[in-house]
């Protein structure tokens, strides 16, 4: 321990399918490192997303890094639209409007720096995953509720176009 500095972050070594997981917006969101485990410095999520089931346009109070593991997506960052495929990487600075649309079922590894309790946001807007698979079909998400919950975590959102 560094003298005069109180550190509570812990080493995290997590095997596949271990740890918290949530069904959010038709996807499986698995927590690899929680905000609590990293003293708020970082949250790492492994997301499995269905075609067309991405988040609404939003900003984060921290930075976001997205690595595409498999599948494809269309990423809207600011005024740009970019295509992602396995091996693609995106870094989005805090406060930048962004959202992505999976163009096939895809898996991404997402890092939030700092963590800002975003894992708690996902827990609140989603539901605990009862299996490590995509959730059963559900009714359309309550976007107004997601926007309201996001605001409590410093996430600004707006409804997707056409809703």
Image (cartoon, rainbow, N blue to C red):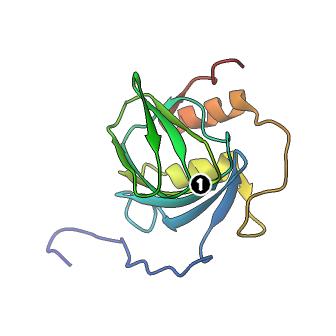
Q: For the residue labelled by badge 1, is the local secondary structure a helix, a strand or a loop?
A: strand
Q: How many marks?
A: 1
Classify residue 162 as left or right of residue 74: right
Give the percent coordinates (x, y) of residue 56: 60, 32
Pointer 1: what residue?
106
Residue at 80% from the left image edge and 36% from the top image edge = 140
Give the percent coordinates (x, y) of residue 10: 38, 76
Q: Is residue 142 above or below residue 124?
A: above
Q: Residue furthest left?
A: 3
For the residue pair 23 and 61, the one nearer the viewer reads as: 23
Residue at 54% from the left image edge and 55% from the top image edge = 119
Name which quarter of the figure residue 138 lies in. Answer: top right
Image quadrant in which the C terminus is located? top right
Name which quarter of the figure residue 81 lies in. Answer: top left
Residue at 70% from the left image edge and 69% from the top image edge = 132
Classify residue 160 as left or right of residue 111: right
Give the percent coordinates (x, y) of residue 43: 44, 58
Classify residue 103 as left or right of residue 65: right
Q: Is residue 112 above or below residue 152?
A: below
Q: Residue furthest top?
A: 162
Give the percent coordinates (x, y) of residue 111: 41, 55
Q: Residues within 10 Å of mark 1 (few under 14, many from 20)?
A: many
Residue at 48% from the left image edge and 63% from the top image edge = 34
């Amino acid at each position: 321990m560094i003298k005069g500095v109180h550190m509570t972050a812990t080493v995290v070594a997590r095997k596949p399918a271990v740890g918290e997981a949530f069904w959010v917006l038709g996807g499986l969101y698995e927590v690899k490192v929680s905000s609590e485990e990293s003293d708020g410095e970082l949250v790492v999520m492994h997301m499995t997303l269905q075609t067309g089931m991405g988040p609404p346009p939003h900003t984060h109070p921290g930075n976001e890094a997205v690595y595409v593991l498999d599948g494809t997506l269309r990423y809207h960052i600011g005024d740009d639209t970019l295509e992602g495929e396995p091996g693609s990487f995106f870094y989005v600075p805090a406060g930048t409007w962004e959202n992505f649309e999976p163009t096939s079922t895809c898996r991404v590894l997402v890092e939030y720096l700092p963590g800002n309790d975003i894992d708690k946001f996902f827990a609140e807007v989603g539901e605990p995953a009862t299996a490590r698979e995509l959730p059963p079909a559900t009714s359309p998400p309550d976007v107004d509720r997601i926007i309201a919950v996001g605001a409590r975590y410093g996430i600004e959102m707006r409804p997707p176009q056409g809703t």
